[in-house]
């Protein structure tokens, strides 16, 4: 299907021209979660780019190659500083293989569990 987003948020399978689906959204949500927590988009240091370069053709090519060859969620700087339950959620969202990536339902369930463990409640009635 059609999509519109920053190249740095594209899931690996999107970079290869494969079909889009909820798995792609989980990848993008995982990257945004990491960026909110760590203050940087974890893909960019791995491929040696800044956020302004992702829209250029050479930038997109670097991202595709870097994700394929070098990105592993375990290599995110500071990942070990996250609580284990949050690490597990992020790792589930950023699996390179879309078949191994957590589903939206699984991510929501994990997020609710994380929130509940901290005395919070997520409202998903919308």
Image (cartoon, rainbow, N blue to C red):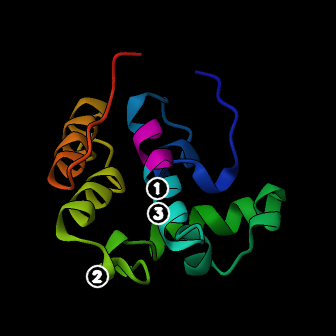
Highlighted range, magenta: 24-29
Element type where label 3 sits in the image: helix
Q: Are marks 2 and 3 in contact (CB under 8 Å)?
A: no
Name the residue tied to disc 3: 34
Residue extending farthest to the top is 126
Q: Are marks 1 and 3 in contact (CB under 8 Å)?
A: yes
Q: Main secondary structure of the magenta part?
A: helix
Quadrant location of the N terminus? top right
* Rendered image: mark on residue 33: 1
Q: CA distance from mark 1 to mark 3?
A: 4 Å
Q: Could you say where residue 30 lies in the image, as x and y percent from the top left?
A: 43, 52
Q: Residues within 10 Å of mark 2 (few under 14, many from 20)?
A: few
Write the residue at 38% across / 37% down: 23
Q: Is residue 124 left or right of residue 39?
A: left
Q: Is residue 43 left or right of residue 95?
A: right
* Rendered image: mark on residue 80: 2
């Amino acid at each position: 299907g059609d999509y519109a987003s920053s190249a740095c948020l594209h899931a690996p399978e999107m970079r290869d021209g494969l079909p889009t689906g909820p798995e792609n959204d989980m990848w993008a949500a995982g990257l945004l979660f990491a960026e909110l927590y760590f203050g940087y988009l974890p893909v960019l240091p791995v491929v040696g780019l800044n956020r302004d370069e992702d829209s250029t053709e050479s930038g997109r090519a670097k991202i595709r190659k870097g994700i394929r060859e070098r990105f592993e969620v375990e290599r995110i700087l500071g990942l070990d500083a996250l609580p284990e339950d949050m690490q597990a959620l992020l790792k589930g969202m950023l699996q390179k293989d879309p078949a191994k990536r957590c589903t939206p339902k699984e991510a929501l369930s994990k997020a609710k569990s994380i929130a509940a463990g901290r005395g919070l409640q997520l409202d998903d009635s919308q």
